[in-house]
Image: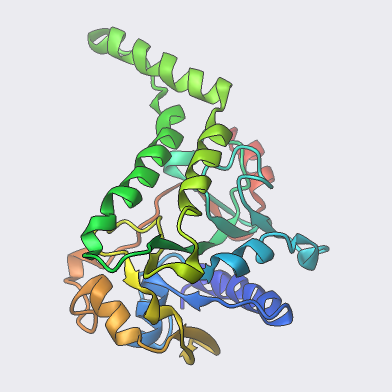
Amino acid sequence: MNPTQERLLVLLKEFIRVCNKHNLRYFVDGGTLLGAMRHKGFIPWDDDIDVSMPREDYDKYVKLQYEYDGTPYFIQTWRTDPHYTYCFAKLRDSSTTFIENFYVNHRINHGVWIDIFPLDGMSYKDKPREKCAPRIRFVWWMNYMSYLPQLTRKFHKETFFKDLGLNIIGCLFYIMDPFHIRNRIVEHHLRHYKLDKAVLAGNYYDFKPKQQAMPISLFKEFIEVPFEDIMVTAPKEYDKYLTMSYGDWRTPPPKEKQIGMHFDKGFSLTQGYKEYMKEHRI
C-alpha cells in the first residue's frame, strides 16, 4: 500500500466499525470489490474506496455523525455540508487535504475520503439493463451543473468574449448556489423505485449507465472476503456482478491504463484542508 491507501484503509475501518455497531448492511463496490477479489486488497494504482449500502441502511448511517465525535472524521452529505453537490455520502478525514480539480471553487470539506453510495431500485419490471440508462444519465446531467463554477478563467485578448461569458456563468452559479434545489430533484429521482419491490437495482452514480442496473438477486446474499489486513463484505455472486460490470475482470488493464481516477489541486496527508487552503490561498 502507498501512504494514501493506508489512510483510506483507516477510513474504511472506521466506516465498518460504525456499521457493525448499528447492524447496518454494506458491501464493497466498484474498484474496491474488484481489488478485493483480484488482489485481496487495493488495486495497486487505485486512489479511492467505494462502498454501497441498501437505501434503508444508508439513510441510517448518514445520521450517525455523533459516532465520530472527538475524531477528524466527517460524514459529508448535501445536508451536512451546504456546498457539497452529490446525492451520495463521503466519509472524510478533516485532518488531511485532497482538493479535486473540479471542486477547487467549492467551499466544502476537502479531506481525503471514501465514497458511500446508496443502493436504489431502478425498475419494477424485468427488462434489458440498458433500458435503465436514461434514468442514470439524468442523474449525471444534473450533476454536471456542479462543475459550472470551474468555468471561471483568465481573460485573453483573442478569446475575450468567450472568457467573459464563461466567467459570468461560473460566477452566477457560485453566487446563487442552486445545488440544493437540484439535489432535492435528484434525490426524489433516486428514491422513485423502492428497493424492496425492485427487480433491477444499482448505483445511479456509476459511470457505466448501460451496465449498472443489476438483478436484485445479486444483493440478497453476502460473504466476507479479505481486503488488505481486514475482512469486508462482498456480494456472494461477486463473479457474476463483476463480469456484468467489467467483463473480463480477472485480467488487469494494459500498463498505460493503470492510473488513478482522481486529480487534485492540493494534497496533503499531514495538514488539514482548512489550514492547507489558507496557507496556499485557495
Would you say residue 147 is visible in this rendering?
yes
Quarter holding the C terminus is top right
Q: Camera-side residue: 125 or 48?
A: 125
Looking at the image, residue 159 lies above or below residue 189: above
The image quadrant that residue 216 belongs to is bottom left
In percent of width and height, residue 143 lies at 42, 41
Q: Is residue 115 left or right of residue 63?
A: left
What is the basis of the colouring in this image?
A: rainbow
Question: Of 146 and 111, which appears nearest the observer?
Answer: 146
Q: Number of numbered discs present?
A: 0
**As rendered, which of 206 and 216 lies closer to the eye?**
216
- Could you tell me residue 73's position as x and y percent? 70, 62
Q: Nearer the viewer, residue 121 or 163?
A: 121
Left-right relation of 16 to 126: right
Residue lying furthest right? 70
Q: Where is residue 151? Give x, y as percent.
A: 39, 26
Position of residue 63 relative to residue 152, above or below, is below
Residue at 30% x, 13% y is 156
Q: Is residue 209 visible?
A: no
Who's the residue at 25% across and 74% down the image? 244
Residue 55 image offset from top left, x and y in percent? 55, 64
